[in-house]
C-alpha cells in the first residue's frame, strides 16, 4: 500500500473536479484527483444512452474561466450531445495539462479526518492511502444510479442496460423489441431515438413528466461569432438572472432581460400568447415565462394546462394523451424535461405506453415484465430509473469528521451544509454544488465555477492569515439549513415526490435539497459572507 502526502485530494473528474484541479495548480498546491471512471467527464462519461444531451444551451454550458478556451471551442448545436460535451472536457483536460494528476479507475472508499494530524486520510479501492490537508468532493449531483426496487430483475434472459451506465460500444436496437422502465428526463431523451431504431418499444410509465420542446438545431456560425464578441457580458447576464438560472439567456433580446412578470397579474390572452411564444422558442426557459409559476398553485395550473393541451394536440390517441398528461404534481416541481419529438413518438405504430400506476409491475420475467394486468415480452430491457441524487455518492464514501463522526449520522435527517459548501465537524472538507446550494436548479457550470472560486479565494485567505483549517459554525449551518427550507417552503417544490426531495429513494429523508432562491441571490449571500470576513466559518 502506498501512502502519499498531498495538499489537496479531489474526488471526481467531471466539470467540477477538472476546474478545481486547475485552480489548485494555480495556487501551487500538490493535488491528487481520484476518478472511478477510466476517463474524465463525470456524468458525461457515464450517461451515453441514445439521445443524451444537455438541457442547458451549449454556449452557456461551458467554462468561463479562460477567454482563450471560450473563444477557441466550437459548439455545433444549440443543445450539445453527450459525445460533444465529453470531447470538450477532454479538450480542457489536455489544454491545461491536467491528466497527469488524475488517477483513473480508482474509486474512493474512505475519507477520514484525523484530529491529531489535522489531515484527511483518503483511501481507494486500488489500495491508495493519501494524506491531504484539504478534501474536496467534486462528486456530482446525479452520479449514483439508483438500483430500482423491482422484483426479479435478474430473471431477464436478455441484456439489461441502465441509462446512467450505458455501454461504451453502444447498443444495436435494430430488429429488436425493447422494454423501457421510467419516463424521466433520460427516458424522454432516449425513447424517440430508440423507437426510431427498434422493431418495437414498450414504455412502462409510473408517473408522467412535463416536457417542453428543445427545438434543437445546428448553431449558426455568424451568430456564434457575434455572440462570442461579447461572451463575458452574456455570462454576466445569466449569472445575475434572478428567475431562470439555467443560462438560457442567449435568446433574442425579448428573452434576455430578466423577466419578472407575474402570471396572475397578466390578462389571460397575454398569458397564452407569451406561453406560446416561449413554447415555440423551446427549452427549459419556458418554465420561467412567469415568476409566480413555481410559487402559486393558481398560476402553476395555467401553465400546466397549457402544456397538457400541447400534449393532447400532439398525441393522436386521446387515451394515450391522457396517460401522458401529468396531474399529480405542479409543473416544474419535478425537473422540467426538454425533448425532441417525445410526445409525437407515441403516434408511432411500434411504440406502446403501459400505465404501471394503475397496474403496477409485479416482477421481471425471463422474457420481459409482468404487471398486475398483463405479461409483456421483449429482447432488451432499458432502466431509465434515475439517481440517488445529491447525497447518494457522498453517503457511499465512508466519510468521517472530527472524533470519527460519520457524515451519514450527521445527515441522518437530511443533508446539512453551510451554503451547501462545508459541514460543521468536517474541517477542510468542501462540497462542490452540495445540498443547500442552487446546484441542480441552476446551470451547473455557473454554480461549479462560483463554488470553486469561492473555495480558492478562501484558501488564499487562509494562506495569508496562516490558518490551518476551516469549518462552518454549527449556528451558521443551522440557520442556513433553516433558510434553505424556508425558501423551499415558499415554493411549490415540496409538493412533488421528486428526486430533489429524495422521494425516489426508499427510506431517504424527505428534504428539499437545493437552494431555490436562484444563483444571483446565492452569489450575493456568498459575497456578503466574504465581505464579513467569511462570516459563519471558523478558522484555526
Ligand atoms: P428521473 O427523473 O428520476 O426518472 C426516473 C424514472 O424512472 C421516473 O419516471 C420514475 O418514476 C421511474 N422509476 C424509478 N424507479 C422505478 C420503479 N421501481 N418502477 C417503475 N418506475 C420507476 O431520472 P432521469 O435519469 O430520467 O433524470 C434525472 C436527471 O438527470 C434529470 O432530471 C436531469 O437533470 C438529468 P416515478 O416518477 O418515480 O414514478
Image: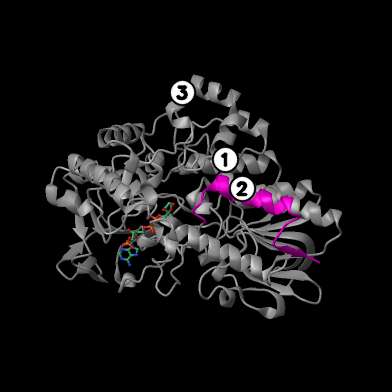
- Where is residue 7? Give x, y as percent: 78, 60
CB contact under 8 Å: marks 3 and 2: no
* Residue 204 is one of the magenta-drawn residues: no
Q: Residue at x 45, y 30 (%)?
A: 251
Magenta span:
515-540
Q: Residue at x 32, y 33 (%)?
A: 274
* Residue 526 is one of the magenta-drawn residues: yes
Foreground pick, 229 / 261: 261
Q: Secondary structure at mark 3?
A: loop
Foreground pick, 69 / 311: 311
Q: Secondary structure at mark 2?
A: helix
495 left or right, relative to 13: left
Question: Label for residue 354?
Answer: none
Res. 448 visible in picture: no
- Quadrant of the image containing the C terminus: bottom right
- Quadrant of the image containing the N terminus: bottom right
Above or below 528: residue 91: above
CB contact under 8 Å: marks 1 and 3: no
Looking at the image, tell me whether mark 1 or mark 2 is earlier in sequence order. Answer: 1
Mark 3 sits on what residue?
220
401 left or right, relative to 373: right
Q: CA distance from mark 3 to mark 2?
A: 32 Å
**Which quarter holds ligand 1?**
bottom left
Q: Sort mark 2 into few (<14), some (14-19) or many (20+) by Cα contacts within 10 Å.
A: some
Question: Label for residue 239?
Answer: 1
Mark 2 sits on what residue?
523
Above or below 109: residue 233: above
CB contact under 8 Å: marks 1 and 2: yes
Label 1 lies in ligand 1 vicinity (Cβ under 8 Å): no
Q: CA distance from mark 1 to mark 2?
A: 8 Å
Q: Residue at x 17, y 71 (%)?
A: 372
Q: Nearer the viewer, mark 3 or mark 2?
A: 2
Amino acid at each position: 500500500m502506498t501512502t502519499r502526502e498531498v495538499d489537496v485530494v479531489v474526488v471526481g473528474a467531471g466539470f467540477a473536479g477538472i476546474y478545481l484541479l486547475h485552480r489548485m495548480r494555480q495556487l501551487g498546491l500538490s493535488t491528487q484527483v481520484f476518478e472511478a471512471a477510466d476517463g474524465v467527464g463525470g456524468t458525461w462519461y457515464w450517461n451515453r444512452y441514445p439521445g443524451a444531451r444537455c438541457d442547458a444551451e451549449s454556449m452557456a454550458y461551458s467554462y468561463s474561466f479562460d477567454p482563450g478556451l471560450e473563444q477557441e471551442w466550437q459548439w455545433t448545436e444549440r443543445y450539445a450531445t453527450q459525445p460533444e460535451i465529453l470531447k470538450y472536457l477532454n479538450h480542457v483536460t489536455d489544454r491545461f495539462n491536467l491528466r497527469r494528476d488524475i488517477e483513473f479507475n480508482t474509486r474512493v472508499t474512505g475519507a477520514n479526518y484525523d484530529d491529531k494530524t489535522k489531515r484527511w486520510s483518503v483511501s481507494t479501492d486500488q489500495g491508495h492511502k493519501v494524506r491531504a490537508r484539504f478534501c474536496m468532493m467534486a462528486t456530482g449531483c446525479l452520479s449514483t444510479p439508483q438500483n430500482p426496487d423491482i422484483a426479479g430483475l435478474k430473471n431477464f434472459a436478455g441484456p439489461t442496460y441502465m441509462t446512467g451506465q450505458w455501454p461504451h460500444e453502444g447498443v444495436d436496437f435494430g430488429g429488436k423489441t425493447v422494454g423501457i422502465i421510467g419516463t424521466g428526463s433520460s427516458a424522454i431523451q432516449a425513447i424517440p431515438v430508440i423507437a426510431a431504431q427498434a422493431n418495437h418499444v414498450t414504455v412502462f410509465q409510473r408517473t408522467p413528466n412535463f416536457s417542453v420542446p428543445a427545438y434543437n438545431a445546428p448553431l449558426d456560425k455568424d451568430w456564434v461569432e457575434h455572440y462570442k464578441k461579447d461572451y463575458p457580458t452574456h455570462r454576466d447576464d445569466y449569472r445575475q438572472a434572478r428567475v431562470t438560472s439555467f443560462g438560457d439567456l442567449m435568446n433574442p433580446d425579448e428573452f434576455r432581460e430578466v423577466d419578472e412578470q407575474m402570471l396572475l397579474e397578466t390578462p389571460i390572452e397575454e398569458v397564452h400568447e407569451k406561453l406560446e411564444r416561449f413554447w415555440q422558442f423551446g427549452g427549459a426557459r419556458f418554465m420561467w415565462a412567469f415568476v409566480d409559476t413555481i410559487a402559486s398553485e393558481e398560476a402553476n395550473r395555467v401553465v400546466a394546462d397549457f402544456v397538457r393541451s400541447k400534449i393532447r394536440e400532439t398525441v393522436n390517441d386521446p387515451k394515450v394523451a391522457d396517460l401522458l398528461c401529468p396531474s399529480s404534481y405542479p409543473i416544474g416541481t419535478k425537473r422540467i424535461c426538454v425533448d425532441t419529438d417525445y410526445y409525437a413518438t407515441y403516434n408511432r405504430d411500434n411504440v406502446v405506453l403501459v400505465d404501471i400506476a394503475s397496474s403496477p409491475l409485479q416482477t421481471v420475467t425471463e422474457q420481459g415484465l409482468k404487471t398486475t394486468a398483463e405479461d409483456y415480452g421483449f429482447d432488451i430491457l432499458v432502466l431509465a430509473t434515475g439517481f440517488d441524487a445529491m447525497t447518494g455518492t457522498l453517503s457511499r464514501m465512508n466519510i468521517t469528521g472530527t472524533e470519527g463522526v460519520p457524515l451519514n449520522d450527521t445527515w441522518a435527517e437530511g443533508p446539512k451544509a453551510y451554503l451547501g459548501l462545508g459541514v460543521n465537524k468536517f474541517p477542510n472538507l468542501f462540497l462542490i454544488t452540495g445540498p443547500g446550494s442552487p446546484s441542480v436548479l441552476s446551470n451547473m457550470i455557473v454554480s461549479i465555477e462560483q463554488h470553486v472560486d469561492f473555495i480558492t479565494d478562501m484558501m488564499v485567505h487562509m494562506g495569508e492569515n496562516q490558518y490551518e483549517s476551516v469549518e462552518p459554525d454549527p449556528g451558521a449551518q443551522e440557520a442556513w439549513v433553516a433558510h434553505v427550507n424556508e425558501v423551499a417552503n415558499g415554493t411549490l417544490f415540496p409538493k412533488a415526490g421528486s428526486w430533489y426531495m429524495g422521494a425516489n429513494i426508499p427510506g431517504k429523508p424527505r428534504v428539499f435539497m437545493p437552494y431555490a432562491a436562484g444563483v444571483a441571490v446565492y452569489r450575493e449571500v456568498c459575497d456578503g459572507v466574504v465581505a464579513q470576513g467569511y462570516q459563519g466559518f471558523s478558522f484555526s
